[in-house]
Image (cartoon, helix red, strand yellow):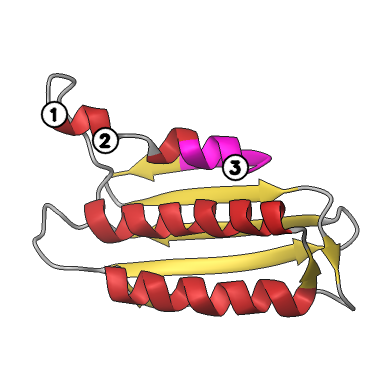
Amino acid sequence: MDAVANPESAAQIRNEFAEWLRRHFRLDATKASDVLLAVNEAMANAAEFAYVTVGRPGAMHVLADYDGSAATLTVTVTDDGAWRRIDPASPQVRRGRGIPLMQALADRATFDASDGGTRVRLEWNQVTAIGDGARA
């Protein structure tokens, strides 16, 4: 799914993604909450920080994929903006809890950043699909 990287789009995608999870997977309440919170954090980071240097929102891309043979759910959130570099002495440093949060909530979290964009890949193991699973 492609959207504008802003809070409204992130909220809409989060709601659609939550419904997709409910329809296609058997997740206990804790794991479902972990998945939604981690994906929401990745989208929130794209919405808040990716395009701060250009002064207007750009694109955010969200792809969810399920590998039935490995029972792995993968969600990738990408943007075309710039990775946020902050001064260690800045008060914003105290806010930087998103990456550790995503790492704690996902079985694997990888972050690829360049001046041309950022890709956050979140993976969860031992996810059981209802039927054939899906791709969103």
| CB within 8 Å, label 3 to label 1 | no
Residue 44 rendering spot, x and y as whole percentages: 35, 57
Residue 134 visible, this angle: no
Residue 72 visible, this angle: yes
- The amino acid type, in three-letter code, at marker 3 is Leu
| CB within 8 Å, label 2 to label 1 | yes
Q: Residues within 10 Å of mark 1 (few under 14, many from 20)?
A: few
The residue indicated by pointer 1 is 91
Q: Quadrant of residue 24?
A: bottom right
**Residue at horizontal 33 percent and vertical 52 percent from the top:** 45
- The amino acid type, in three-letter code, at marker 2 is Arg
Q: CA distance from mark 2 to mark 1?
A: 8 Å
- Residue range (magenta): 101-111
Pick the quarter of the image with the C terminus.
bottom right
The residue indicated by pointer 2 is 95
Any magenta on residue 107? yes
Any magenta on residue 1? no
Q: CA distance from mark 3 to mark 2?
A: 18 Å
Q: Between 111 and 128, which is closer to the camera in this rendering?
A: 128
The residue indicated by pointer 3 is 105
Judged left or right of residue 42, residue 83 is left
Question: Counting residues from the N terminus, which is met first, the one under dot 3 or under dot 2?
Answer: 2
- The amino acid type, in three-letter code, at marker 1 is Pro
**Residue at horizontal 70 percent and vertical 58 percent from the top:** 29
Question: Counting residues from the N terminus, which is met first, the one under dot 3 or under dot 1?
Answer: 1
Residue 31 rendering spot, x and y as whole percentages: 70, 53
